[in-house]
Amino acid sequence: MYFYFSDKVVLLFDFWNVRTPAGMVLSVLVVLLLAMLYEAIKISKTKLLRQTILAIPTTLSQESLREPETGSVNSNLGQQNTTSKRWFLYHISQSLLHVAQVVIGYLVMLVVMSYNTWIFLGVIVGSALGYYLAYPVFTAR
């Protein structure tokens, strides 16, 4: 297989059959946006991971290893319950972002495997532009 320049290509599904230069431009824009979305999800996933780590207090995990005192059992139980719920919500969010990232990543990979140079360039530019735009947005405090 080799890369080729053409305005005719079938991408992912039979209904995404590109036959004209205008269709190729539109397809490159869609693929570019898909690559940008992939980068935004990847960076937002790392930000969510950082928020998850900061949200779980280290003293709580250390205290749960020791035997609880009789007077402080009820107060620690409420704090552990709230922290467990928060951690569970963060974990569900990270899992959903991961699934979205994997699905979009495989779609982008399959699009590149059409070996169309215009589509490949759209993925490269979309990935670079997505990282360039999403990194400052998601890493700002």
Image (cartoon, rainbow, N blue to C red):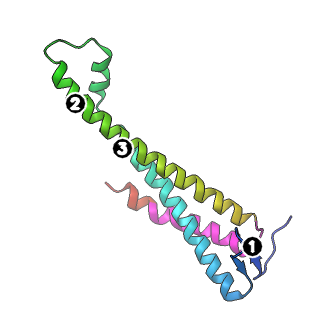
In this picture, is 70 found above or below 35?
above
The disc placed on residue 79 is 2
Categorize mark 2 by other alpha carbons within 10 Å: few (<14), some (14-19), many (20+).
Answer: few
Q: Which residue in the protein does label 3 denote?
A: 89
Q: CA distance from mark 3 to mark 1?
A: 42 Å
User: Is tag 3's residue or tag 1's residue first in the polypeptide sequence?
Assistant: 3
**Viewer-proximal residue among 38 and 19:** 19
Is 39 displayed left or right of 83 in the figure? right
- Looking at the rendered structure, the secondary structure element under dot 2 is helix
What is the C-alpha distance between the residues marked 1 and 2? Answer: 56 Å
Q: Main secondary structure of the magenta part?
A: helix
- Residue at x 28% of width, y 32% of height: 57
Q: Quadrant of residue 22?
A: bottom right
The CA distance from mark 3 to mark 2 is 16 Å
In magenta, the rendered stretch is: 114-134
Location of residue 81 in the rendering, given as x and y in whole percent from the top left corner: 26, 31
> Is residue 56 at all visible to an observer of this figure?
no
Q: Is residue 132 magenta?
A: yes
Which residue lies under the disc numbered 1?
Answer: 117
- Image location of residue 19, percent across then percent down: 74, 85
Q: Is residue 76 left or right of residue 25?
A: left
| Residue 44 at x, y percent in the picture | 44, 54
Which callout, 1 or 2, points at the residue further toward the start of the chain? Answer: 2
